[in-house]
Amino acid sequence: MHPATRSTCCLLSLAALAACSDDSTLQPTAPIKGPPTGVSLAMAPDPTAHTASSGGATTVDDATSGAFSHVSPNIAAGSAEFNLHVDGDEEFEDAFTVNDPTSTHNGLGPVYDNVSCEGCHAGDGRGRPPAPNEIAESFLIRISYPGRDATTGAPNPVPGYGGQLQERAIPGVEPDASVSIAYTEVAGTFADGTPYSLRVPSYSFYGSYEALSKKMLFSPRVAPMNFGLGLLEAIPEATILAKEDPKDADGDGISGAANRVWDAAANRTAIGRFGWKAGVPNVVQQTAGAYNGDMGVTSPMFPAESCEGDRPECARHAPEVTSDVVLAVARYMQTLGVPARRDLDDAQATQGEAIFYQVGCAACHTATVTTGTLAGVPSVSNQVIHPYTDLLLHDMGPDLADNRPDFQANGREWRTPPLWGIGLVQTVNGHSDFLHDGRARGLLEAVLWHGGEAKKSRDAVLNLPASARAALIRFLESL
Ligand SMILES: [Ca+2]
Ligand SMILES: [Ca+2]
Ligand SMILES: [Ca+2]
């Protein structure tokens, strides 16, 4: 929560909430019946977040399939930021290949998951798990052995496989393995008797190039959206740390903590911000890591191929992209504007917005944050933004657990994902698969999977009448 918007009279019933809100547009349009919800998580709505300007001056007014792909409008054409954005945009789309004398993008593999950044982050948007009989396109499996590296804190690599199970390989090389996903339906009911069903994924690996050990831990992940990342990187560390409450000292059931990860360029521990478990400290490292792990493309930051075992193709050679390319691609994502929020005057969405605070969603999905500065990216400085994330790790319960630690994140913890733009995923990416592994078919299922620290919030949603549930989803769709 943004300190400036913390109300002194938060809590309790919607009547009380309406009474102490200083913005009438955020009051629910109809009283909500049903049992009272978790008292301690309820928060007063944040009136500053009731705005179209989700990304401050970087906000883009486009709700079409191109919504995630615009340079921030506060960047002047011809400026250094603009030129790097344009260069990075091209590199982001370029497909890598191998031994093609006509290509400037050789170096793919030996093992990889896709040939370009765009291949997984289509339209700078998000991926989905593979359908039955499909090889994953925009989804990957992180792997490790129990324990962590004494210096970096990184999870231990799997001998012969490293930290990622690549499903593709260049000609003459075997991929690490293939994955198939089976789903089991589990039925539930809302308090009003309405039934719902959630699909529980289970993963099996086949065709591995050598035997996979039962010791292997794995974490399936879909590609997240790529806009607004400079803003998230520009949030002052102190702002993130101020929301930490690892021992839940205030007793509200929320015990968020920042991840502490390895900054490979600075050679030291840093706060984690990116990835589903906040395992990466900044966008440059995420970019170099993606080239390396997802595409098999080496760079000065990660000069060894992400390829292990007794395979000659894995040998060391000169970097396949320069630091300049990595930097341009990172700048590209750091300067992608945030799509504007829509339907601010829609009564149902506004009712849903009040419910979002009342049932405690904002305890983790922080609505308003003010950025600091980010070297080289002036456009993201000092912006009041509405990302709906605290960038902290939360225990989300056993049902969402991957049981694989990632630096300080344990097997049940995930980083609160930003919710800005989430209502446009269907338009941009043609699906509405949510959560880290895409198991949720739509926004309501995503909420129903919440457990652990968010269980109270989820239970409150189960107790909402149908009209209030619909309003909550309508609000999420307006983001
Ligand atoms: Ca390579
Ligand atoms: Ca591997
Ligand atoms: Ca707490």
Image (cartoon, grey):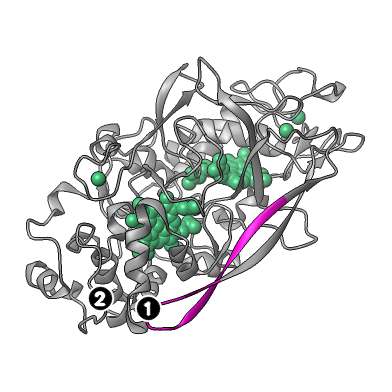
- Placement of 444 over or under 146, stated as above or below: below
What secondary structure do most residues of the magenta stretch adopt? strand
Tell me where residue 323 appears, x and y as whole percent: 58, 25
Between the residue at mark 2 and the residue at mark 1, the CA separation in whole angstroms equals 9 Å
* Mark 1 Cα shell of 10 Å, populated few (<14), some (14-19), many (≥20): some
Q: Earlier in the sequence, mark 2 or mark 1?
A: 2
Circle 1 residue: 191
Query: What residue is shown at x 38% (from left), y 79% (from top)?
Result: 470
Comparing 460 with 27, the one in front is: 460
SS category of the residue bearing label 2: loop
Which amino acid, by three-letter code, is at mark 2? Pro
Comparing 129 with 108, the one in front is: 129
- Placement of 132 over or under 244, stated as above or below: below
| Residue 99 visible in rendering | yes
Q: Which picture quadrant has residue 448?
A: bottom left
Which amino acid, by three-letter code, is at mark 1? Ala
Q: Which picture quadrant has residue 357?
A: bottom left
Circle 2 residue: 35
* Mark seen at residue 254: none
Do callouts 2 and 1 mark residues in contact (Cβ within 8 Å)?
Answer: yes
Comparing 106 with 236, the one in front is: 236
Left or right of 320? Residue 445 is left
Residue stretch in magenta: 187-203
Tell me where residue 227 appears, x and y as whole percent: 46, 51
Image mark count: 2
Tell me where residue 61 appears, x and y as whole percent: 39, 65
- Placement of 160 over or under 37, stated as above or below: above
Comparing 63 with 82, the one in front is: 63
